[in-house]
Image (cartoon, coloured by chain):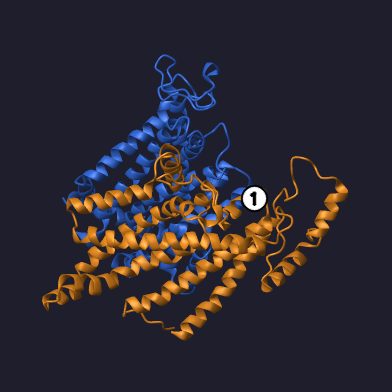
């Protein structure tokens, strides 16, 4: 079947490539680049991601290494090469903040990927297949909406223990609802378009049409939602860490660092402020980028 | 509308039942129980304890018994606070959370909505940018950071000044003890309300009926407050429904930070202690509230937007 479809599609793509036109994506990209807040956000995000991933390898201290000469919260000190000082156990704060960033970003991205996967699948199937399937799936989503989900994540974390993989699966499993609704709405408007009809006429199966035609066309809206979900997930993770249900020591995340820092607040506010600043800036940037993307991709405000 | 209301209530009951069921089995099937402590309990006592809480009954019987006692308004005995029933604990904690949540809600609406309108009317001016940036800040600073910062500033640094506020505790609901937690609770909601109101207000001001209202010479403030705001409030109400439920059931974070004996803190402690019945009680209560609030929101749409009809 796919062999039959391949040639007409290929020809159509070739034809499109030869004519000079601006695609929706090029248009959106140009609008995004004109939005200073969004571009700044994007640049800072890339920087933070880079230092979080590469940074820990370049530092003289690792995140779990205790400097026995300074087993107290030490102010920044160039001589011992603790550029942000140490925490109350003598561990390098910069190394921990960067490592925490790695975990926080990872949870954010992985959990959002899980949400993306479930949400797009459910939304696209509900919207495209319609009828009773649609009704049942959306009833289920409605039902889930009335569940106090934060409570459920907490119960899950208590029940199954503090497990890194479980954490992003659990968070992802509660964040997909809105995604499913958005994708369904988009799919409903796409369903009756001519190109879908054409795909159906040329013998494409439902699965094929959803994967090849529906999903690529809802990606724009989905992307906006993804950039707005990641910061929410990071917040939720930090909230779990705050309750002592996050990941295990000596591993750390921004939320855990903030929680540790809060305990030392009176003695060394620095241990709270530095990770909090990293996290806040990251969340800011995601929000700016998300807003920028929405303006760029949303045809309504053009 | 009444048949719609009745139908929604009828749907709400099985929803609540499903939540109760999932919650019940999730908590009972876990390894580790409420009586695991640092010191192992002698076997004979453990047998007695399990008999006392009916944990030695078959699971289905425990489940049926629990459902029946729930119908009588009895949430069962707490596993950790030995001399209390969950009903007593909730009866103690819920009013506290309710008062704080309600105060925070009023504060959020009174500050958030007007600020959102101001920003929308001044779209893309400096005033708009300042309000929007402040709102964004309120959203991205998690309230456990904000709570600690507030404590540091008003509880520690300003200790000897006249604006000194208690760093925590409840003191039977003394006014000074309420200020910081309520403010901390309200802050993210203020921020969200500003953003939502601003967005929907900008849209509403572009609508044709607003242009008509202005064209027929109505004063500006009438157009804004009576014509534009009414439809702009639809997304606000949508947001407020579940938000109200969460505010009223108490923010777990704020109650934990400020050491307030509300049900949010009970839930956190219950979860950490594996106090099954307490956790279930709070979860059921808040699920019921969320369901009720969502219904209230759907009914409010009809008042705000004449296009909404309750059919089917």
- Residue A191 quadrant: bottom left
- Residue B309 quadrant: bottom left
Q: Is residue A84 left or right of residue A220?
A: right
Residue at 57% from the left image edge and 42% from the top image edge: A244
Quadrant including the C terminus of chain A: bottom left
Quadrant including the N terminus of chain A: bottom left
State the image coordinates of residue A221 (x, y, percent, origin top left).
Answer: 33, 57
User: Is disc 1 placed on a helix, strand or loop?
Assistant: helix
In this view, A33 is above or below B282: above
The colour applied to the residues of chain B in this rendering is orange
Residue at 36% from the left image edge and 63% from the top image edge: B109
- Residue tagged 1: A159
Residue at 29% from the left image edge and 37% from the top image edge: A43
Whether residue B247 appears in this view of the structure is: no
Q: Nearer the viewer, residue B78 or A147?
A: B78
10 Å neighbourhood of mark 1: few (<14), some, or many (≥20)?
some
Q: Nearer the viewer, residue B121 or A128?
A: B121
Q: Which chain's colour is blue? A: A
């Amino acid at each position: 079947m796919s062999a039959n479809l391949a040639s007409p599609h290929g020809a159509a793509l070739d034809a499109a490539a030869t004519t000079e036109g601006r695609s929706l994506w090029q248009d959106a990209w140009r609008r995004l680049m004109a939005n200073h807040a969004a571009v700044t956000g994007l640049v800072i995000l890339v920087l933070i991601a880079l230092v979080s991933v590469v940074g820990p390898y370049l530092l003289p201290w690792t995140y779990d290494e205790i400097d026995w000469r300074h087993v107290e919260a030490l102010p920044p000190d160039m001589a011992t090469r603790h550029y942000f000082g140490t925490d109350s156990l003598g561990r390098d704060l910069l190394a921990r903040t960067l490592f925490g960033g790695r975990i926080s970003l990872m949870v954010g991205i992985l959990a959002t990927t899980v949400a993306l996967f479930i949400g797009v699948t459910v939304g696209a199937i509900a919207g495209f297949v319609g009828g009773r399937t649609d009704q049942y799936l959306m009833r289920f989503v409605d039902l889930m909406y009335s569940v106090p989900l934060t409570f459920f994540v907490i119960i899950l974390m208590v029940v199954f223990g503090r497990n890194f993989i479980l954490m992003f699966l659990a968070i992802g499993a509660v964040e997909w609802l809105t995604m499913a609704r958005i994708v369904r709405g988009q799919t409903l408007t796409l369903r009756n378009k001519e190109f879908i009809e054409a795909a159906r006429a040329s013998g494409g199966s439902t699965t094929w049409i959803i994967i090849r035609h529906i999903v690529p066309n809802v990606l724009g809206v989905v992307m906006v939602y993804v950039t707005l979900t990641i910061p929410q997930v990071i917040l939720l993770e930090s909230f779990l860490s705050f309750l002592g249900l996050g990941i295990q020591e000596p591993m750390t995340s921004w939320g855990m660092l903030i929680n540790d820092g809060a305990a030392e607040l009176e003695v060394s506010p620095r241990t709270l402020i530095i990770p909090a600043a990293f996290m806040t800036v990251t969340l800011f940037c995601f929000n700016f980028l998300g807003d920028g993307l929405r303006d760029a991709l949303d045809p309504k405000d053009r | 509308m009444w048949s719609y209301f009745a139908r929604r209530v009828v749907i709400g009951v099985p929803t609540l039942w499903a939540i109760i069921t999932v919650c019940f089995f999730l908590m009972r099937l876990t390894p580790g129980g409420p009586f695991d402590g640092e010191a192992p309990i002698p076997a004979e006592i453990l047998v007695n304890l399990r008999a006392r809480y009916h944990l030695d009954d078959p699971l289905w019987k425990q489940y049926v018994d629990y459902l029946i006692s729930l119908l009588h308004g009895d949430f069962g005995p707490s596993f950790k606070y030995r001399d209390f029933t969950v009903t007593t604990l909730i009866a103690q904690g819920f009013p506290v959370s309710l008062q704080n949540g309600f105060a925070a809600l009023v504060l959020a609406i009174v500050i958030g909505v007007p600020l959102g309108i101001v920003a929308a009317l001044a779209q893309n001016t400096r005033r708009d940018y300042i309000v929007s940036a402040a709102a964004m800040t309120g959203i991205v600073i998690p309230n456990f950071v904000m709570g600690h910062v507030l404590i540091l500033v008003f509880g520690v640094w300003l200790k000897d000044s006249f604006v000194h506020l208690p760093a925590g505790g409840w003191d039977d609901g003394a006014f000074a003890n309420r200020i910081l937690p309520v403010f901390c609770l309200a802050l993210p909601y203020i921020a969200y309300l500003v953003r939502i109101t601003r967005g929907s207000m900008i849209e509403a001001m572009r609508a044709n009926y607003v242009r008509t209202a202005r064209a027929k010479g109505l004063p500006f403030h009438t157009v804004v407050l009576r014509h534009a705001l009414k439809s702009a409030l639809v997304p606000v109400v949508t947001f407020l429904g579940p938000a109200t439920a969460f505010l009223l059931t108490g923010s777990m974070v704020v109650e934990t930070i400020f050491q307030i004996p509300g049900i949010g803190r009970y839930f956190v402690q219950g979860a950490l202690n594996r106090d099954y019945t307490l956790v279930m009680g709070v979860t059921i209560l808040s699920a019921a509230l969320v369901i009720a609030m969502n219904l209230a929101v759907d009914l409010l749409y009809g008042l705000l937007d004449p296009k909404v009809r309750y059919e089917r």
